[in-house]
Image (cartoon, rainbow, N blue to C red):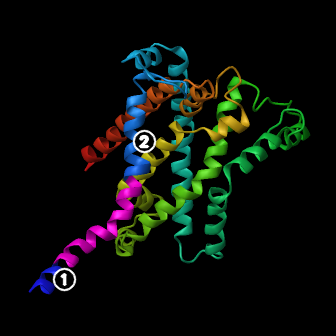
């Protein structure tokens, strides 16, 4: 009887033992840092010594700081430059790559993924060279047709579009993969029925593909919203947040607190970004439910 009881106990404990390593790692590297950062955001701590409790001062400082709101505004402009264009490009590319009659389809799919798996710092360095005002290839080509040199990375007017172009080129392949997975779930009979009713390719794209991919598209929008507002490596390598702070994104502004060892304010900044992105994500989900 005792042996039977022990066997039953082992069977009951087995699932918990299997998930225990994941739970331990999750608690150690996700839950604990989250609560530590939350507590840190209410203190003035420079990385050593005792942390001084300051209450809501860090949050009030950030909310009244023009630099913080400027970084949010820069990220919002980049979002407007990136997300609509990227969705259109990714959707058209996904539809073309989903066509079984397309020759070398596998090669094209790999070509779209290569930029996404290439290290970001390497791509950013290439961007610095290609868009250099004096020696860059882009200005060199424009000079052949009589266009004067453009300060792609040194003027406030062009720095954001150049940075947005880098982000689009780097991450569009990932969005194409997401949309391709959504296209695989659409029944081909729907398109056949629409074709019999006289609907052309453009009409099918607008009236069938886009509505049926609405959830997938919204998922991609939420992912890219997170990525845009966390953008750091691109401005850090390409523009260093300039010129005149025009490319200081929310993620790059957060990094500035770390370089000054102002860890309490940095923690508060990170939580404000979490709240902002959460609100945007909930707004997108609400929009999706309203359409449903």
Please tell me the numbered disc located at residue 151.
none
For image coordinates 72% across by 37% down, the residue present is 238
- What is the quadrant of the N terminus in the image? bottom left
Residue 112 image offset from top left, x and y in percent: 63, 61
Residue 80 image offset from top left, x and y in percent: 52, 35
The answer to whether residue 64 is left or right of residue 208 is right
The answer to whether residue 135 is left or right of residue 265 is right
Q: Is residue 208 visible?
A: no
Q: Which residues are magenta?
A: 9-26
10 Å crowding of disc 1: few (<14), some (14-19), many (20+): few
Q: Main secondary structure of the magenta part?
A: helix
For image coordinates 66% across by 75% down, the residue present is 104
The answer to whether residue 104 is left or right of residue 266 is right
| Element on which disc 1 rests | helix
Residue 167 image offset from top left, x and y in percent: 62, 45
Q: Is residue 235 visible?
A: yes
Residue 140 image offset from top left, x and y in percent: 89, 40
Magenta segment includes 84: no
Magenta segment includes 17: yes
For image coordinates 66% across by 35% down, the residue present is 235
Find disc 2 in the rendering and name its residue: 33
The answer to whether residue 56 is left or right of residue 140 is left
Find disc 1 in the rendering and name its residue: 7
Compare residues 102 and 68 and report the one nearer the observer. Answer: 68
For image coordinates 75% across by 31% down, the residue present is 153
Whether 95 is drawn above or below 274: the answer is below
The tag earlier along the polypeptide, 1 or 2, is 1
Whether 124 is drawn above or below 26: the answer is above
Whether 50 is drawn above or below 201: the answer is above
Q: Report, in whole angstroms, how far the alpha carbon at label 1 lies from the one at label 2.
A: 38 Å
């Amino acid at each position: 009887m005792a042996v039977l009881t022990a066997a039953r106990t082992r069977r009951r404990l087995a699932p918990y033992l299997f998930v225990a390593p994941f739970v331990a790692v999750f608690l150690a590297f996700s839950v604990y840092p989250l609560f530590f950062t939350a507590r840190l955001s209410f203190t003035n701590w420079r990385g050593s010594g005792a942390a001084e409790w300051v209450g809501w001062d860090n949050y009030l400082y950030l909310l009244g700081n023009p630099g913080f709101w400027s970084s949010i505004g820069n990220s919002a402009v980049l979002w407007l430059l990136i997300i609509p264009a990227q969705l259109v490009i990714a959707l058209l590319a996904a539809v073309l790559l989903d066509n079984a009659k397309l020759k070398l389809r596998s090669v094209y799919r790999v070509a779209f993924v290569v930029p996404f798996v290439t290290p970001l710092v390497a791509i950013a360095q290439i961007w610095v060279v290609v868009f250099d005002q004096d020696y860059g290839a882009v200005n060199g080509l424009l000079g052949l047709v009589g266009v004067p040199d453009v300060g792609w990375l040194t003027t406030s007017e062009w720095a954001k579009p150049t940075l947005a172009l880098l982000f689009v080129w780097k991450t569009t392949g990932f969005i194409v993969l997401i949309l391709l997975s959504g296209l695989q779930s659409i029944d081909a009979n729907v398109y056949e029925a629409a074709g019999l009713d006289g609907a052309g390719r453009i009409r099918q794209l607008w009236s069938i593909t886009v509505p049926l991919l609405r959830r997938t598209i919204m998922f991609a929008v939420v992912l890219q919203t997170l990525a845009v507002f966390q953008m750091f490596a691109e401005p850090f390598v390409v523009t260093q947040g300039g010129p005149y702070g025009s490319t200081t994104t929310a993620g790059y502004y957060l990094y500035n607190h770390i370089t000054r060892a102002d860890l309490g304010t940095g923690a508060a900044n990170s939580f404000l970004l979490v709240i902002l992105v959460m609100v945007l994500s909930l707004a997108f989900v609400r929009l999706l439910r309203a359409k449903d």
